[in-house]
Image (cartoon, helix red, strand yellow):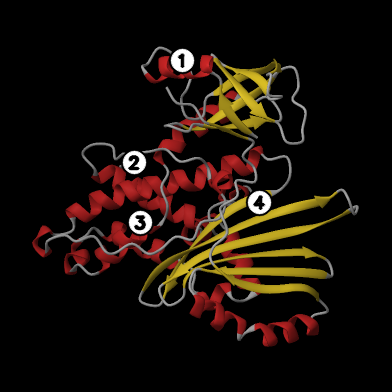
Amino acid sequence: MIIQPTSLAALTWAGAASGTTAQSWRIGAVLSARPLGTSPLGLLVIQIGALTVEADVASSQLPAQFQVRVLSLGAQPQLEILSQPVDPTFQRALRERLPQQNGYAPLLSTLGALAQRPALRQLPPELRTALALLEQSLRTPAEITRGEGLREAINRSGMFFESRLADPLGNMAALAEDDWKGALLRLAGLLDRRAATPSTPNRSDTEPPLLQRGLQAQARLPLPALPADEGVDLLLDRLHGDVKASLARVEVAQLEASANMLPAWMIEIPLQGDGGRDVLQIQLEFVNDAAEGGHGWTLGFALDLPALGPIQGELQLREPRLSVRLWAERADTVQRLERQFNPLRHRLAACGVLLDQLSCQVGLPQPLGRHSAVLLQATA
């Protein structure tokens, strides 16, 4: 649903921007909304908090009363229609973590720079151990190219850390070492004790949760350029903020997954790549096909490798049928991928999978916020 402001909305938003209603428009805040009628142009007029806006409703009819959650602010605030009332605890947790989150690329860059400093060997043993465990939790390309290895990487991505802790048969000590979130928590605790003041991630804007944004390939970041004589203290301070931002990233993804009616996850897996570290983004969603009375899974992925550039893919599995669509930013990468199509067809046929589509095209698709219900555009 795309919402355009009426003149009243523009005036109200001007007041919000100047601070008169800013308290209600915070990231994660839940606002009451109700439809007011129809405009002369046939658009639905909706009151959202103190704003009155016009909405172009594509398919669904809105109830007499509903709620929306603020996902992002700025010139184009983004709101999500909620299917059910929100738990205040959930609302508070999301509001706290959204401004703190950041991708894994800055953390991986800082780790790479830290590993090159000889003074790293002079750190306290427990801190060196925590850094080694975080490095150990990175997956390798060889692991994730096997089905069992990819399943294990997803399980250890941090998304299911608490549920694995609750397993009575689980090994808690081993879990704290091989799970990405467990390793982050361990390192964060040690860095908290070392820091003179609490670390806060350096974020100039607040982005909505990953599922709202859709798949986005993430490139490697260059190593931070710091003088060699600075030692490791400056890098450790930087690492402290990066670890906190990565923890917030995992926890926002966990909160969002728990609020969905159908199983849907956006999972990020840090990889130990060739000459550096990369981030594999996976979107996994269970789909009910009401038209055909069937169901299945959709798996999307995004990856940016130095040798191939940004790549994105979508696999739709409706057993025993499979459709595969790939996109690459570079034409030479498309050609390299297409040369692997025949071997892939043979392997799928040997597994009894019926391949309906296998294609690759130049250019990346526009990110689709599949779970984003409302985009509010308001200007003073």
Residue 200 sits in quarter: top left
Quick check: 9 above or below 342?
Answer: above
Quick check: 78 above or below 104?
Answer: above
Q: How many marks?
A: 4
Q: Is residue 66 left or right of residue 238?
A: right
Q: Report the residue marked by disc 4.
A: 168
First along the sequence among labels 2 and 4: 4
Q: Position of residue 237 (x, y in %)?
A: 24, 49
Give the secondary structure at mark 1. helix
Of circles 3 and 1, the one toward us is 1
**Camera-side residue of 150 and 218:** 218
**Camera-side residue of 148 and 253:** 253
Q: Can I make out residue 137 in this image? A: no
For the residues labelled 2 and 1, the Cα–Cα distance comes to: 29 Å
Quick check: 114 above or below 255?
Answer: below
Specify the amino acid type for callout 1.
Answer: Leu
Give the secondary structure at mark 2. loop
The circle drawn on residue 107 is 3
For the residues labelled 3 and 1, the Cα–Cα distance comes to: 42 Å
Q: Position of residue 248 (x, y in %)?
A: 45, 43
The circle drawn on residue 11 is 1
For the residues labelled 2 and 3, the Cα–Cα distance comes to: 14 Å
Q: Is residue 141 left or right of residue 351?
A: left
Residue 318 sits in quarter: bottom right
The circle drawn on residue 203 is 2
User: Could you classify mark 4 by the number of other residues whose Cα lies within 10 Å: few (under 14), some (14-19), or many (20 or more)?
Assistant: few
Q: Are marks 4 and 3 in contact (CB under 8 Å)?
A: no
Of circles 4 and 1, the one toward us is 1
First along the sequence among labels 4 and 1: 1
